[in-house]
Structure formats: structure tokens, C-alpha cells
Image (cartoon, coloured by chain):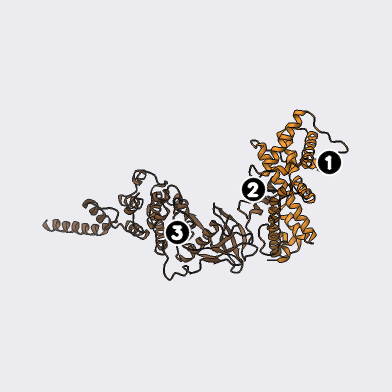
Chain colours: A brown, B orange
Amino acid sequence: MKSLSDSKLDHLRNIAAEPDFGGTKYRLIKELAHGGMGTVYLAEDPDLGRRIAIKVLNATELDSALARRMVREAKIIARLEHPGIVPVHDVGELGDGRVFYAMKLVRGERLDEYATRVTSIKDRLRKFQAACDAVGFAHAHGVIHRDLKPQNIMIGSFGEVLVLDWGVAKIIDRVAGSEASADADTLPLPGSQRKVQGKENVDDTTHGTIIGTVGYMSPEQARGEIEQLDERSDVFSLGAILYYLLTNRTPGPAKPRSLNAEVSKTAEAVCLKAMSPNSADRYPRSADLAADVARLLDDEPVSAYRENWFEKTRRWMGKNRFLILIVLAYLLMRLFFILTSRR
Amino acid sequence: MDRDTDIGGPQHRFPATSYSAIIAAASDDQQVRQRALETIVASYWKPAYKYLRIKWQTSNEDAKDLTQGFFTTAIEKSYFAGYDASKASFQTFLRTCLDRYVSNEKKAAQRLKRGAGAEHLSLDFAAAENDLASHLPAEGVTSDEFFHREWVRSVFTIALETLAERYEQSGRELHFKLFERYDLRDEPSEKISYASLASEFKLKTTDVTNYLAAVRRDFRKILLEKVRELTGTEDEFRQVARELLGVDVK
């Protein structure tokens, strides 16, 4: 056989690295994204005639910590039925031993890409609020994400906001009656005689492990205090995302208003409260942050900022501009009539 | 899935074989040892020859003699039985042995021109020389990287030859021809669709999809078998497989 050219060799290496979907109903189309833990592929479900995304673990050891984490990720997402969280359709094992899960294919752009296109702070805040709602829903179900950042938030083609990549999420509370809180500690995978140890409340991360992304992880995450992490750690990351949306910069020591003069004092206060170094000073839950962002959008007073009388008046006037104009017009007309009737 | 198109049967996994030619090279059984040495020589002689030409700047004739001499001496003196997996990968070990051999030969200025009585390995040096002309190392590539890249090329070529042989033996030349036409075409930029292949080979498009998927699966399986054969330890196997395929394999 003729020796392989460089291009053929590279092509064959790619082929050999492709996951083996032979034992499943799915047909591989192409790779979409490659990460440290897994690779996401575009695939087709021929039974339903639709395109889906399949995340495949970059390892064939079914009993490894990574495989356990991936199965747990799929189960966590499956229990979070929310329009802001991508639904999982299937989980299993490929012929080559790799764990996979199939999910809805989301077409759109990442939040950081969206921010390069959309400059309006109000529009950005609306997307941010939707992300807070999705994270708040997860919190209400005892799940913390632990790796929130603009790259893990997707804006779909219909403007919907989806929180992605729950690979390092942690279950902090077992919710009674939840379908996913089944008694089985093992997950049988379709087409496999084996079972993956998938105990949900088992966290593969140990104290001292640093999880998250620099710039977006909370100080307690950066210190590796895994056992102390709760919803407020996610609130910090959301605050960091808000910082990015207000300034177009990864969070740093500068206050948002010093980087972007268009940022209001109230928006800055919401951001800084969410990013308080001390977790006790932050919003206790994502829902509380979302509520303050909603107030911000409605020009209502926010819990993070105490207004003085001048600001209160100015905000009131700003909100009631139409009423003030009508009253002013009425007064002017009265004045006009008074003056003209005297002549 | 089409069972007929699958060498290992459905749901086969990455190679179950744990045969390692590197370990077998130290076997007491002469037949086992012989087979192992043939496997090692088959995958390493071309990279060694090209490495000598590039790193040692030897002439075509000298590189031939040195390659012949190195592998013959390695077999006679059981060089490979002395491999210690805890110290380095087999590839590094072999390259070090080769460097030492060439250095000694040069120092002594007594390169062995093996006479009629000496054993010669059947190696196609003309093909190796042609390969070298078409795959000269790019600027900035070290001789170690070049050796590794050539070894990878050699292992992939051997895996392909084995694949072709197995498909021929099982009467499925058509499957392999499809694979050749689609995945081994000379111009990878040439656009070929499954539909055009189906019409060319008078098949259904779904058959083309299934046959190609099966051949690729078998290729991966054979490739990993070869890597398993050519690595001395589980760790080394996993490391090389990860480097070649980008995934952790068992």
C-alpha cells in the first residue's frame, strides 16, 4: 500500500477519533464543539427525522469519575424541566464504551457573542434576567451550577435564553417527590449490561478542588471550599456575568460605572451586591437577584441601593413624565386663561 | 446496524486483546518472540530509515545499511528484551538504541557491510526513499517529532493494510472500495456525496452510510489493536491512543 499523505493521515486520525454510534439509532453528522470532558456532535434521530445534539464523553471508561459525572449531568438536566434549560432526550453508552447523552439542538449565539452585537443595556438586562430565572429554578430544585459564565449561556434563534453545561453542577438538596430522585443509585445504560454508578448526591469533587472559571467563580470556589458552596456562589457568578454585560469586560477590581458611564448607580449596586466577596452580603438566591433586575428594568427601587430624596424624586419624575407633562400643560393653560381673562 | 459489515460483531468495544509485541519480544518461546520482532520491525523500520536520513544526514545507501544493521543486531542481541517500561516509552527506547547504534558504528568507522552469510531483512527501501521525498519534515520540526510522526504514518498504513486484508478475506471488497473512494481519495477537497457514491456503486444511500460507518469502526478497532501491540504497558497504550484519537481508551 502506498504511504499515506499528510492530509490522508490527518483525515484518518479524525475518522478514528469519531464516536461509534453504530449501536444507537443516531447518525453522526459533524462535530460542533470540543471540551475537556466531552465533545458535542450534531446528529440525526432518524425515527423522528430531527437533528439533535449529542454530548459524548472523551473517555471510554464507564466506571470512571468522568463517566459518573456525565451521567449525573444528564440526570440533573433531566430533572430540571424549564424553558431556560436544554432538555435531555436520552442517555446511554456507545459501542466504543463512551457515555453519551442526547439533547435538543439549540441554534443561536452565546451570551458573549450576543453582547458584541447588542449594545442596549436594557436588552442585555432582559436576557440576564431570564438566565437568573433559569438558575433560580435550578436552585429551587436543589441544584447549583458552579460554572456560570457568558460562554455557558445561549441565546436561541427565537430570543430564548438557555443555561448550558451542567457538567460540574452539584445537588445540594434532595427534593421530595422529584422524579429524578429515584432510589436507584445506579443508572442502567441502554444496550449495556453494565451500570454506571450514578448516585446523584455523590459529588466527585472533593474539598480543595477548584471548580469554575477564573473571573466568574466566587471567592469561596477559588479557595476550593467545595463543601461550603451554595446558591450564593452561583449568585456571585451571575453578578460577574452582569458586570460583563454592563462593561463588556471580564470582572476586575474597577467598578462598572468607572468603565461605562451609561451604567446607572442602581445597576452598579445590584451587580456589586451579587458580587460581594462575603457570601452573606449577596442575594441569598438567584430569584432575589432576578427580582432586583426586574425592578431595575421597571425603574423601581432595588433592594441593593438606598436612594436619597433627590434620586427618589428624579426617578419618580422619570417614571411619571407623561403625568407631569399633562399637569404642566394644564397649569400653563390655566395660567393662560387667567392672564387672558384679566385683559 | 448491519451485522455483516461488522468485523467484531455489534456492540464491540475498543480492542479486548492485550497482546503486546513489546512484551512478547522478551518471551522464552522462540516463535512468540519471532512474531513479536516482526511486528516491531514492520512498524519501525520506515520511521528509522527516514530518521537516519534526516537526523544523521546519511546517504541513501548508508541509511539502508544502518537500518538493516540496527534491526538485525537488535534481533540477534535481543535489544528489545532489555526494554524497561518504567523508564521511557518504547518509541523513545528504540530511538535511543538507534542513536547509540549509529554513533558506535560511526565512531568505530567500521560499518558492517553484511556478507552473504549474514541475515538480511526484507525491507522495501525504495518505497521508503519515495515516501521521504514526499514527506520531508517542515521547518522547526525536531528529529524526535519527525520520528514520531513517521511512526504514526507507519502504524496507520499497517492498520489500513490489515483492514484491506480482512475485508478481502471476508469477501467484502465492495465495502473497502467505498472506504477507499470516500476516505482515502487523493484529493480530500474533492466533493463526493454519499448519494453520488450510491449511484456510482449502484447501492442505496443508506447502504453507503452503513457500510462506511462499519469500515470506519473496524479501522479504529484495528488501529487500536496495532497500537496495543506496539506499546509495552497499559499506560503507554492509553497515552498513545489518547494522542492519536483524542480520547481515553481502556
- Nearest the camera: B121 or A147? B121
Upstream in sequence: badge 1 or badge 2: 1
Circle 3: element type = strand
Circle 2: element type = helix
Write down the residue under mark 3.
A170
Q: Position of residue A313 (x, y in %)?
A: 23, 54
Write down the residue under mark 2.
B236
Type of amino acid under label 2: Glu
Q: Residues within 10 Å of mark 3 (few under 14, many from 20)?
A: many
- Nearest the camera: A120 or B124? B124
Residue B133 in view (yes/no)? no
Q: Residue at x 44, y 54 (%)?
A: A148
**Residue B120: image tag:** 1
Left or right position of A250 against B226: left
- Nearest the camera: A273 or B151? B151
Circle 1: element type = loop
Q: Residue at x 62, y 58 (%)?
A: A19
| Callout 1 and callout 2 share a chain | yes
